C-alpha cells in the first residue's frame, strides 16, 4: 500500500483536506472523476462569498471567524491572496429579522459590524439607490474567497509534499470488511488501497456512498457574470462590497475577473436526482437579475455582456454539513453537504479532517455535523 490516505473528490473540500493531511506528513492521493478542479463540481468558480453573517447562528458565525486566520496562513505560505476582505453588505428588504439577528450575533461576539440606514448606504455607495432597503448590516471582515485559485495552490502543495493527484478516476464501489474500508474500485475495474479514506464527493455523495444511504439532496443554482455597461471602476472591490438580499435570495460580487461581476441565486433551486451535465443556465435568471439591479443599482440593469453558469448545492434535510466518520467504519470519513458554504470554511474543514484521520480530537465540536442525526437509506 503506497498511500496513507485516499481522498475522493478534488473540489475545495477534498483539496483542502488533502493539503492539511500532506502537511502533517501523510502520504496522500487525491482522485477526481474529471479533473482537479472539475468544471462540473461546485467549487470551480473564481470567487465565492465569505460571510460572518449567519442570522442568530452564533456557532456558524464563530466557525467563519475562526477560518479567517487559517486563510491568512495559507496566503503567507503560498504568497497569493485567497480571501479578499472588501466587506459584505446585507440589505434588509423584508422584515429585516435575519439581518437584525446577524447584527446582534456579530456584536455579541465582538466582531466588527455596522448597522446602516438606507440613506447611509446610499451616501457610502453612490451607485446604490436610496431607499433600496429598510436598513443594512455591513461587516468589513467578510468578502470573497478565491476558490479555484485555492484548489490550484493546495494541489501544488500536495505534490510538493510527496502526495499525488489522479484526475480521471471515477470510484464506483467501496469495498469493506470487518468495520474497515479495504479498497475502492474505479470505473475501469482498478482497485485503489490506502490506510484511510476521505470522501469529499460533493453533489455525487449520494451516488458514491449509495451503500450507506446518505440522504443528501442536490439543487441547481444559477449565477450570472455580467460586465457593468458603464463606470466599471466604481464596481471594483475597493469601492463596492459583496452584497446580499436575503429576502430575494440573491447575492452579488464586485468586478473581480476580466471586468466581470457576478450575481447568484442562493435560495434552494430546483432539485435534481443527480447532476445533469452539461450544466446549462436558465435565461429566466437573467430577468430576475435585471430586476434586482433596477431596484438596487439602476446603472447596472441594462448590462449586455453576460455569461450564465449553473452549479449544484448539496444539502442535508436540516441544512447542516456532514463531517463525520462513515457509519460502522473505522478508517473512512465523509465531508459533504456544504450547500452555500464549502469554500468559506474550507481551511477549517481541512484542518478538522486532518485531525480526525490522525486520531486527534478535532478543533471544533462536531456534534451538529454527525451522520447519525439523519435517517439513512442504504441501498437494499
Ligand atoms: C451557484 C453556487 C454558489 C455558491 N456560493 C457560495 C458562496 O458564495 N460561498 C461559499 O462558501 N459557498 C458557496 N457555494 C457552495 C460551494 O461552492 C460548495 O459548498 C463547495 O464548492 C463544495 O465543495 P466540495 O469540495 O464539497 O464539492 P465539489 O467542488 O463539487 O467537489 C466534489 C468533487 O468530487 C468529485 N467526485 C464525485 N464523485 C466522484 C467519484 N465517484 N469518483 C471520483 N471523484 C468524484 C467531483 O468530480 C468533484 O470534483 C455555492 C455553490 C453554488 C452551486
Image: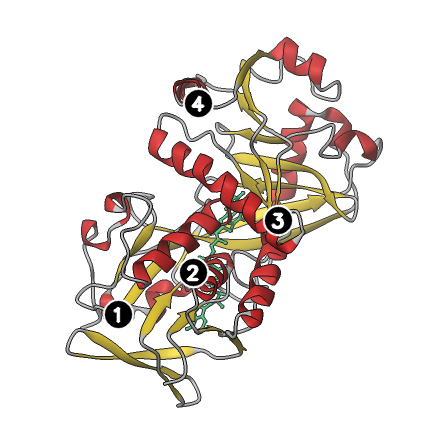
Asked if one can make out residue 78 in the rendered structure from this viewpoint, the answer is: yes
Name the side, left or right, on which 37 lies relative to 326: right
Tell me the mark number nearer the camera, choosing from 2 and 3.
Answer: 3
Determine the secondary structure under disc 2.
helix
Cα–Cα gap, marks 1 and 2: 22 Å
Q: From the image, tell me which residue sits under label 4.
A: 106
Q: From the image, tell me which residue sits under label 1.
A: 331
Q: Which mark is first along the chain, 3 or 4? A: 3
Total numbered labels: 4
As rendered, which of 280 and 139 lies closer to the eye?
139
Q: Residues within 10 Å of mark 3 (few under 14, many from 20)?
A: few
For ligand 1, tell me if the residue under mark 2 lies within 8 Å: yes
Tell me the mark number nearer the camera, choosing from 1 and 2.
Answer: 1
Q: From the image, tell me which residue sits under label 3.
A: 76
Cα–Cα gap, marks 4 and 1: 38 Å
Q: Would you place residue 129 above or below residue 31 in this image?
A: above
For ligand 1, tell me if the residue under mark 4 lies within 8 Å: no
Q: From the image, tell me which residue sits under label 2.
A: 203
Image point (37%, 79%), residue name: 172
Amino acid at each position: 500500500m503506497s498511500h496513507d490516505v485516499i481522498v475522493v473528490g478534488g473540489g475545495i473540500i477534498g483539496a483542502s483536506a488533502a493539503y492539511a493531511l500532506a502537511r502533517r506528513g501523510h502520504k496522500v492521493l487525491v482522485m477526481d472523476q474529471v479533473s482537479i478542479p472539475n468544471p462540473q463540481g461546485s467549487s470551480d468558480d473564481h470567487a465565492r462569498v465569505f460571510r460572518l453573517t449567519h442570522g442568530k447562528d452564533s456557532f456558524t458565525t464563530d466557525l467563519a471567524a475562526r477560518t479567517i486566520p487559517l486563510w491568512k496562513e495559507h496566503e503567507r505560505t503560498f504568497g497569493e491572496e485567497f480571501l479578499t476582505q472588501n466587506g459584505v453588505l446585507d440589505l434588509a428588504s423584508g422584515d429585516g429579522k435575519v439581518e437584525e439577528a446577524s447584527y446582534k450575533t456579530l456584536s455579541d461576539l465582538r466582531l466588527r459590524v455596522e448597522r446602516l440606514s438606507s440613506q447611509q448606504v446610499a451616501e457610502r455607495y453612490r451607485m446604490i439607490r436610496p431607499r433600496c432597503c429598510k436598513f443594512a448590516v455591513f461587516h468589513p471582515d467578510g468578502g470573497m474567497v478565491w476558490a479555484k485559485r485555492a484548489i490550484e495552490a493546495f494541489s501544488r502543495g500536495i505534490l510538493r509534499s510527496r502526495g499525488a493527484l489522479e484526475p480521471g478516476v471515477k470510484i464506483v464501489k467501496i469495498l469493506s470488511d470487518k468495520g474497515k474500508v479495504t479498497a475502492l474500485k474505479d470505473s475501469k475495474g482498478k482497485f485503489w488501497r490506502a490506510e484511510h479514506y476521505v470522501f469529499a464527493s460533493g453533489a455525487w455523495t449520494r451516488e458514491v456512498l449509495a451503500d450507506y444511504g446518505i440522504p443528501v439532496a442536490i439543487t441547481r443554482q444559477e449565477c450570472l457574470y455580467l460586465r457593468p455597461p458603464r463606470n466599471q471602476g466604481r464596481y471594483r472591490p475597493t469601492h463596492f462590497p459583496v452584497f446580499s438580499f436575503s429576502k430575494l435570495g440573491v447575492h452579488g460580487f464586485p468586478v473581480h475577473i476580466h471586468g466581470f461581476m457576478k450575481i447568484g441565486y442562493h435560495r434552494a433551486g430546483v432539485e435534481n436526482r443527480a447532476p445533469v451535465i452539461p450544466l446549462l443556465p436558465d435565461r429566466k435568471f437573467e430577468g430576475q437579475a435585471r430586476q434586482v439591479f433596477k431596484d438596487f443599482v439602476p446603472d447596472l440593469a441594462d448590462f449586455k455582456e453576460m455569461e450564465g453558469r449553473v452549479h449544484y448545492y448539496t444539502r442535508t434535510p436540516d441544512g447542516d454539513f456532514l463531517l463525520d466518520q462513515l457509519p460502522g467504519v473505522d478508517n473512512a470519513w465523509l465531508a459533504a453537504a456544504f450547500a452555500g458554504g464549502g469554500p468559506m470554511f474550507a481551511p477549517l474543514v481541512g484542518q478538522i479532517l486532518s485531525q480526525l484521520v490522525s486520531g486527534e480530537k478535532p478543533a471544533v465540536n462536531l456534534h451538529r455535523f454527525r451522520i447519525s442525526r439523519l435517517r439513512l437509506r442504504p441501498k437494499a
